[in-house]
Amino acid sequence: MASRDSESWARPVDSLATTAVGASLDRVTGKRVVGPVQGFGQMWQKTFRVRLEGSNLEPRELVALWKEKFSTFWPKGSTFYAPLAGIAPGEVALLDVSPVPGSPVRLSTGVMVIYADEESFAFMTPEGHALSAWITFSAHKDGDVTVAQAQALERPADPFDELAYMLGGNRLNDKFWAQTLEALARSVGVTEPSVETQKVCVDRSRQWRFVRNLRHSATIGSVMGAVTAPARWVRRRLRGEATR
């Protein structure tokens, strides 16, 4: 049993590498994983649950489906690029996320699968991600009903992301995972899913010793990339004309 459980955990690595393809940008390769202990802002624990009333899927069947089609349950405007081996311990996925619906800025980041078995799987964020976090996806029985759950322990990675979190990012993050669970529930036949959300601020302090996380910020990098895109386009056109 102990051996089987140890195989479900990712092995420690000094830096991340990914086999995921299709993302607009890879800001993950070469980075380290960081959890909420290494984040800057206030720490939150969030739990999202949805009861799959009317579905006959057992928890393990639901987790298998969730892993296989994980990206299809995300809200429009956000994309999960799975590694070639799928959601398995040690694998690294890439993400393109819109910070605000309709925004021209795309945040390019990723996650590492730190745990995966038949009953649950968990991600950890890399340096540069807007949130320093762990998030676990699981399913269990409540009487005769299977319940899907996503639970995050997170804190904004740096002062810039903490400000964005306070100005609406926290609420948008909640909406993202609620919509994800609603989509999962609908995929197994639940016509009117109701997501229960629980939020607790478990640490109101800000960890100023991690203010230098700003140097890894995917948020700042993505914003600067969008702002400078027109100038880069002009330079490419000028170079092209000069070589003719």
Image (cartoon, grey):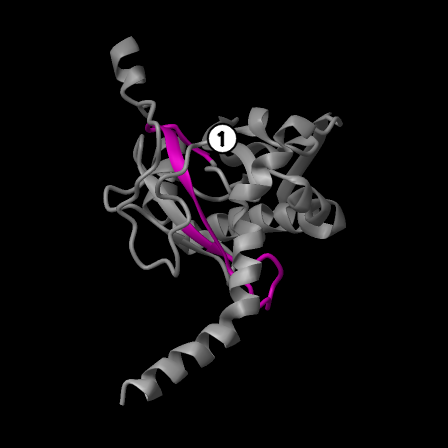
The residue under the point 60% across, 33% down is 154
The residue under the point 68% across, 34% down is 41
Count the numbered circles shown. Answer: 1
Q: Looking at the figure, which quarter contains the C terminus? A: bottom left
Residue that lies at the very extreme toward the front in this rendered image: 242
**Any part of residue 1 in sight:** no
Report which quarter residue 151 is drawn in: top right
The residue under the point 34% across, 23% down is 12
The reply, left or right, for residue 163 in relation to residue 64 is right
In the image, residue 120 lies in the stretch drawn in magenta: yes
Of 175 and 102, nearer the camera is 102
The residue under the point 48% across, 28% down is 141
In this rendering, the answer to whether 90 lies above or below 22 is above
Classify mark 1: residues with Cα within 10 Å, few (<14), some (14-19) or many (20+): many
In this rendering, the answer to whether 156 lies above or below 191 is above
Q: Position of residue 65 (x, y in %)?
A: 35, 43
Residue that lies at the very extreme toward the top in this rendered image: 2
Q: Looking at the figure, which quarter contains the N terminus? A: top left
Report which quarter residue 29 is drawn in: top left
The amino acid marked with disc number 1 is Val
Q: Position of residue 22 (x, y in %)?
A: 32, 59
Q: Position of residue 157 (x, y in %)?
A: 60, 38
Magenta region, residue range: 95-124
In this rendering, the answer to whether 22 lies above or below 142 is below
**Any part of residue 22 in sight:** yes
**Secondary structure under badge 1?**
loop
Name the residue that disc number 1 marks: 34
Q: Position of residue 71 (x, y in %)?
A: 40, 52
Judged by its main secondary structure, the magenta piece is strand
In the image, residue 188 lies in the stretch drawn in magenta: no
Of 106 and 83, nearer the camera is 106
